[in-house]
């Protein structure tokens, strides 16, 4: 973790401190939490991709990018199963998505008026996804500054988990729209980045596909469907890029 | 400025399954036909090729092949007393656009509805008594019986090369097929798909419970197959990219593979893409739709295409929109019960699941076709006694896998967090060891579920959006609870390591999570012009030369995926036109 260029030195010290505290836990719950924090300081194992390269940003500000890196690494922490979300390229995936057609409102009906609806009526804001995440990240940082005194990406892992849980449950106070709605969108786009074909910038080295055992392409199983009935299909995954 | 074009024999609005079938049958009868398709020309050899046809994000998540909600959507409310708001992002249902329509990206389940579904009101009245059907349940009989439609079901199955096994061949019940189905004249054109691991677990559990399973009828060809058009389908690759995707193997039946190559080669047919039909030009006195106005979306120019016959083959919502705007029929009013247009909008009770987890079994969910199920029909329609249950109808119950695309398909046991370490561990552990039992329930008409025109929101052409007033009703709530209990019983019989409780469509209907693109009604077929919009040949009561296709003519929705019935009704209507209407244009049923 200390080698990770995207995690500040100050935070490494915080994490290391928490790990040290685990040696003398006050109770079991605390021990488990400290244990989980300590695990994050362990560098990812054999499944690790090539060292991540910071890509130039298309639309995100540095602050927003730092938020998505920290969020991706909390939602998808590094462990023996895969590198962290950001090491898999999730923040770059989000940057590209929000800079492109999806981010600018493709396939989104945007005519007003925009009265508040029932949840079963779905999304009713005038914001496109780029605007929605701009406002949401600003609200999230405002919330963590109030609750923890720092922007989200400056929090230690335990605090990030606490902050994301507050958003997930709609308990974090946001301006304009609820934090649960923001969290839902954040989780969705993060998982898209982790599991989509690597051609979009996330899922580097097909880390998530290796993690679950999804073979990707070419997906032509006319004979294998019988041959592998009830048996593990132990082929290395391949991406669209491998056939292009 | 509208350019008036030279009259043609027939114009077809929308070139999906029904538009392709009708245009093909009418050109074969010698008519000159123009097909108006708002979307692009799309053919598998150009548009659905490896490797990009396997792009989960593009097709399944960003919805590449569907109607663009930016241009056109519907508004939605739960009841007539509320204000409807636009469905800003498609979710619950995903109408198609472009050549082939939703037929290019469906899954391929191709059913016949039950004989009792065909005469639902009279069947239930006969079995349970006159007062058994609640007054607000405005269900009707289809004016076409199962026996009448059987040859047309049969033909559509042959066009699609459906893979399956008969359970009722000319009255003889056959184990391994659906023994509840109506009598079939012929076996399915192709043998069933090879069973998945999920299917074999389902089969064993059901057998232990005393139910006989069968393979869901699938328009994913199990073998290379040549249809009655002389067109060839490839054999399914079980790629796990079916619903929401085009098929590069040409194994999934679609208009693009099964009909259009012949139709487009016929000089009597002219396909016009980018032709977005705006309105019908209706002459009430003459009882005719004289012409169709459309916009060329490349230039913005407007054209008027006069035609002797007009076939309305758009999706449910556009069929309703065009007829409502033209005033062909009286708008339904839930307060008075008067009017037929927009009446009996129905949906389906879809996306009900029980998920089962097996430590020691490998599922390989990614090796599957989109229509790859092992079913029981014991709790469908009126296949079981509803005496004392307090509801009518039922559900198809099936297990199987359709895909393992991990953006959306990654089961974790109940109680697992949605993210973080524990989520990751569970996802890695269970991805290849879980599947869902699913149920799709019928949707019976309710007095307050209907369609009309929205007073506020407009589409890209400046027309009102269709307004949907819909909610799950008492019958639906009771039905899903009953079916959920059956699914849990089947789940337990599988002896899974872990199992979820039944996740059912409880509470209010929501337009957010995907359920099914099986919207029906609004221009329903019937025997009475006061309560229906088209007659038994799908000819509009108010316009002799207008024929309305698709599920918008269903008086209510059975549990089955609708395409089999949609295809059969199109061939049935086409025959009435070519054999009777052309010779003697006028009402095919006395008004």
Image: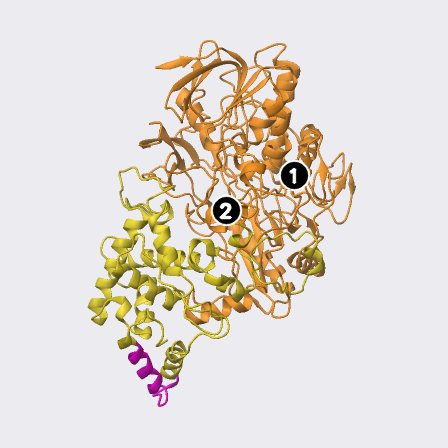
Chain colours: A yellow, B orange
Chain for numbered disc 1? B
The part of the image, by quadrant, that contains residue A175 is: bottom left
Mark earlier in primary sequence (2, 1): 1
Whether residue A169 is visible, yes or no, is no
Q: Secondary structure at mark 1?
A: loop
Residue lying furthest right in this view? B172
Q: Return the residue at label 1.
A: B114
Residue drawn at the location 39% of the way across and 36% of the way down = B74
* Labels 2 & 1 near each other (Cβ < 8 A): no
User: Which mark is nearer the camera, 2 or 1?
Assistant: 1
Chain for numbered disc 2? B
Of A74 and B588, nearer the camera is A74
Residue B382 location in percent, x, y? 63, 43
Question: As drawn, is B464 to the left or to the right of B183?
Answer: left
Instruction: Give the number of the disc on residue B559.
Output: none
Residue drawn at the location 30% of the way across and 68% of the way down = A163
Q: Is residue B231 magenta?
A: no
Whether residue B514 is visible, yes or no, is yes
Residue drawn at the location 70% of the way across and 45% of the way down = B222
Of B85 and B423, nearer the camera is B423
The part of the image, by quadrant, that contains residue A138 is: bottom left
Q: Residues within 10 Å of mark 1 (few under 14, many from 20)?
A: many
The part of the chain drawn in magenta is A12-28
Question: As drawn, is A181 to the left or to the right of B38?
Answer: left
The part of the image, by quadrant, that contains residue B393 is: top right
Q: Return the residue at label 2.
A: B476
Residue B127 location in percent, x, y? 64, 39
């Amino acid at each position: 973790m200390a080698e990770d260029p995207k995690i500040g030195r100050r935070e490494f010290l915080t994490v290391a401190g928490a790990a040290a505290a685990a040696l003398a836990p006050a109770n079991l719950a605390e021990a488990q939490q400290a244990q989980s924090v300590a695990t994050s300081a362990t560098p990812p194992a054999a499944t690790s991709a090539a060292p991540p390269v910071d890509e130039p940003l298309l639309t995100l500000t540095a602050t927003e990018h730092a938020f998505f890196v920290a969020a991706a690494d909390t939602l998808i922490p590094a462990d023996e199963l895969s590198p962290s979300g950001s090491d898999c390229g999730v923040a770059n995936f989000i940057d590209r998505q929000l800079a492109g057609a999806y981010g600018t409102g493709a396939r989104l009906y945007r005519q007003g008026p925009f009265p508040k609806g029932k949840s079963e009526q779905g999304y009713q804001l005038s914001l496109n996804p780029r605007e929605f995440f701009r406002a949401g990240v600003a609200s999230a940082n405002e919330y963590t500054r109030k609750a923890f005194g720092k922007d989200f990406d400056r929090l230690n892992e335990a605090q990030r988990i606490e902050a994301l849980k507050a958003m997930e449950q709609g308990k974090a106070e946001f301006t304009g729209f609820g934090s649960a709605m923001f969290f839902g969108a954040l989780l969705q786009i993060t998982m898209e980045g982790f599991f989509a074909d690597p051609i979009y910038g996330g899922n580097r080295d097909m880390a998530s596909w290796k993690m679950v055992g999804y073979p990707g392409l070419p997906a032509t199983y006319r004979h294998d469907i019988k041959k592998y009935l009830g048996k593990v299909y132990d082929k290395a995954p391949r991406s669209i890029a491998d056939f292009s | 400025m509208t350019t008036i074009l030279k009259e043609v024999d027939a114009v077809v609005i929308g070139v999906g399954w029904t538009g392709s079938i009708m245009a093909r049958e009418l050109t074969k009868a010698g008519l000159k036909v123009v097909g108006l398709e708002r979307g692009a020309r799309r053919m598998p050899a150009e548009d659905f090729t490896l490797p990009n046809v396997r792009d989960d994000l593009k097709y399944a998540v960003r919805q590449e092949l569907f109607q663009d909600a930016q241009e056109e959507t519907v508004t939605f409310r739960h009841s007539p007393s509320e204000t409807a708001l636009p469905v800003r992002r498609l979710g619950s249902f995903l109408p198609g656009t472009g050549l082939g329509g939703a037929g290019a990206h469906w899954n391929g389940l191709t059913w016949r509805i039950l004989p009792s579904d065909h005469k639902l009101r009279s069947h239930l009245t006969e079995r349970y008594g006159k007062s058994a059907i609640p007054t607000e349940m405005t269900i009707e009989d289809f004016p076409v019986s199962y026996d009448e439609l059987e040859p047309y079901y049969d033909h559509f199955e042959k066009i699609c090369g459906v893979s399956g096994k008969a359970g009722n061949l000319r009255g003889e019940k056959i184990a391994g097929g659906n023994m509840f189905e109506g009598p079939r004249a012929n076996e399915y054109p192709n043998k069933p798909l090879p069973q998945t691991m999920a299917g074999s677990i389902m089969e064993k559990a059901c057998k232990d419970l005393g139910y006989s399973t069968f393979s869901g009828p699938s328009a994913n060809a199990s073998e290379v197959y040549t249809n009655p058009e002389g067109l060839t389908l490839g054999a399914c690759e079980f790629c796990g990219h079916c619903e929401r995707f085009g098929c590069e193997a040409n194994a999934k039946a679609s208009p693009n593979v099964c009909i259009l190559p012949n139709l487009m080669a016929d000089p009597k047919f002219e396909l016009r893409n980018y032709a977005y039909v705006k309105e019908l030009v209706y002459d009430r006195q003459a009882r005719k739709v004289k012409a169709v106005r459309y916009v060329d979306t490349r230039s913005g120019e407007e054209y008027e295409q006069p035609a002797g016959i007009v076939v309305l083959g758009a999706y449910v919502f556009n069929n309703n929109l065009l007829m409502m705007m033209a005033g062909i029929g009286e708008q339904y009013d839930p307060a008075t019960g008067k009017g037929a247009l927009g009446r009996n909008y129905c949906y389906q009770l879809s996306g009900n699941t029980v998920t089962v987890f097996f430590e020691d079994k490998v599922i390989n969910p990614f090796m599957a076709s989109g229509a790859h199920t092992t079913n029981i029909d014991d709790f469908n329609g009126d296949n079981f006694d509803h005496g004392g249950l307090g509801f009518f109808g039922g559900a198809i119950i099936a297990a199987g896998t359709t895909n393992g695309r991990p953006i959306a398909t990654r089961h974790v046991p109940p109680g697992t967090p949605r993210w973080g370490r524990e989520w990751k561990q569970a996802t890695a552990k269970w991805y290849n060891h879980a599947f869902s039992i699913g149920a799709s329930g019928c949707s019976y008409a309710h007095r307050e579920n209907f369609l009309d025109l929205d007073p506020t929101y407009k589409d890209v052409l400046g027309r009102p959006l269709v307004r949907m007033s819909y909610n799950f009703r008492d019958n639906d709530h009771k039905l899903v609870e009953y079916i959920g209990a059956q699914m849990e019983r089947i789940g337990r019989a599988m002896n899974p390591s872990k199992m979820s409780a039944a996740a059912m469509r409880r509470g209010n209907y929501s337009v957010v999570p995907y359920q099914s693109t099986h919207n029906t009604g609004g221009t329903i077929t019937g025997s009475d012009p006061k309560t229906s919009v088209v007659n038994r040949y799908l000819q509009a009561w108010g316009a002799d030369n207008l024929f309305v296709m698709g599920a918008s003519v269903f008086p209510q929705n059975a549990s089955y995926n609708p395409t089999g019935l949609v295809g059969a009704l199109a061939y049935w209507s086409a025959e009435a036109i070519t054999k009777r209407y052309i010779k003697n244009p006028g009402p095919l049923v006395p008004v």
